Structure formats: structure tokens, C-alpha cells
Amino acid sequence: MRPIVIAANWKMNTTPADAGDLARTIASRTRVAGVTRVICPPYVSLATVRDALVGEDVAVGAQNVHHEPAGAYTGEVSTAMLAGLATWVILGHSERRAYFGETDALIGKKLDRAVAAGLRPILCVGEVLADREAGREIAVVDAQLRGALDGRDAAALAAAGIVIAYEPVWAIGTGRTASAADAAAMADAIRASLVALGWGSVAEATPVLYGGSVTAANVGDILGQPSVDGALIGGASLKPDEMAAIAASAGITAAARGLAS
Ligand code: PEP
């Protein structure tokens, strides 16, 4: 049975002075049976958020990690530095790809490093608008998955609890959302890509989230799709009211799938 995951990506928002309160508020308002919750604050707030969440069943994630274990990489953060601070990590977010030149090959190396460190990866994939308008969104996402995953050990990635997040770039931070049907179709296509990569039954067991302007208003339709297992939430994840409603919706999905007991 795949888990239902709601993961908050705070991006470059909040400071250590306010992150703890926000995390505590979100945690207290999103306690819903059967839903796995993750908060990914900026690096500098990881310790604050970890401490704020003591006693809550909410995981802490990093938004990125470097692919090398240590060395002359000014400004970067290694998996060893995340030990004790984060148990999840977002990899290959479209903002990392677009603004920092991250390639599928590099993201694959980060996956290796994350898995070796026992971090649970959320691997982000998704097409730009021109790709969707040209009808090549499935081919683009398939190429991203191949580029990051080909040759890697599916069993090891499954054991690490890998989650794939489908995040169409044109929907991130824009207020535009993929239709629930399009999100579901891509989740199916992602699992087909994993099967083609030799993942076998691991493909069906891999959670696929949707991300891209998820709000309380649209999450119900998206999570009503049997192939979609949760959401990666950016802007709305900074708003406790939104997160409370998103979690409630995720709880309905969890109950419907028999995960809530
Ligand atoms: C994201 O950052 O992963 C994201 C989906 O952002 P937003 O919800 O703001 O579109």
C-alpha cells in the first residue's frame, strides 16, 4: 500500500526566527490519520524546525543536497551535514534545474549520495509549457527519469522510500494547475517509465505526488485520483489554513484507501 504524503517546500522563505512557530502551527493543524507529513525549510532553519517538531509525527526534509561527500564546494551542503537535521530531501526541483543548471545526470548522483546517507528522496520531474503544448510531456518526463535513474538499483531506491513528484513547470508558483486527469495520466506514465527501467513491481509501489499551485481548493480533485499519492506544496505550504485544509483532504483519501486506521 502506497502512503499518502503531503510535503511542504518552503523554498527561500521564512527565517530561523519565525520558522519554528510556523512549523509548530502547521504540525498542530495537520494531524490527520494515515497521512505522512514532511516540512522542508531552508537549510538554516532545519535545526529550529526539527526542535519545534519534537513530539510531532512530522518529518523534516532538506530542499537539496550536494552530490559529493565533502570538499571545496563553497556554499554547498553535504549529506553528512544533514545528519540529525533532516530525514528527507527534495532532489531535482525545477527551480534547481532552471536556475542552478542541475542536469538529470547530476540529480542521479545526488540520489546515490542521499540513499547512501539514509535520506528519503523526493525526485522532482516535470515538463515546461512548450513541451506540454507540443504534446511531448510524457516523453520529457520519461527522459528525466531515465537520466536520473537508469542503471541505479531500484531495490535500493525503494528501500530508501523514494517518492517521485510530478511538477509541471508551468504550474509551479503560477496559480495554474494540471487537471486532476492530467496529473493521474502522468502518474501512470511515470510508473510505466519505471517499469521500462526494469523496476518491476517496485514501480507500482512507488508513491507519485503532484506539485504545482496546489491549494485547499484544488487538492481534493487531485488526491481523488487513485494513481496520485499526495502533494508537494510550495506557496500554500506557508499558510497554516491552507495546509490544514490540504491535510484534511489528504486524510479523506487516506481513509478511502484504508490507510487511516
Ligand atoms: C513547489 O515548490 O514544489 C511547488 C509546487 O510550488 P507551488 O505550490 O507554489 O506551485
Image (spheres, rainbow, N blue to C red):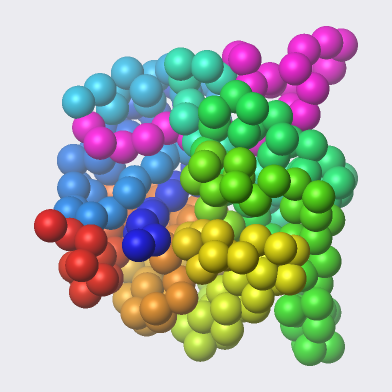
The number of numbered badges drawn on the structure is 0
Q: Is residue 60 above or below residue 154?
A: above
Residue at point 17%, 54% (across, down):
33
**Residue sticking out furthest to the top:** 71
Q: Is residue 260 above or below residue 43?
A: below
- The magenta stretch is 56-81
- Across and down, in percent, residue 226 comes to 39, 78
Which quadrant of the structure image shows residue 256?
bottom left
One can see residue 141 in this view: no
Q: Quadrant of residue 187?
A: bottom right
Image coordinates for residue 23, horizontal then vertical, percent: 32, 34
Depth order, front residue of 115/187 = 115
- Comparing 259 with 248, the one in front is 259
Q: Position of residue 180 (x, y in %)?
A: 47, 83
Instruction: Return the residue nearer the eye: 186 or 126.
Output: 186
Q: Residue furthest left?
A: 261
Vertical placement of residue 244 versus 218, above or below: above
Most common secondary structure along the magenta stretch: loop
Name which residue lies at 48% across and 26% down: 86
Q: Is residue 2 visible?
A: yes
Q: Is 77 part of what is drawn in magenta?
A: yes
Q: Quadrant of the N terminus?
A: bottom left
Is 76 in the magenta?
Answer: yes
In this picture, is 140 found above or below 108? Answer: below
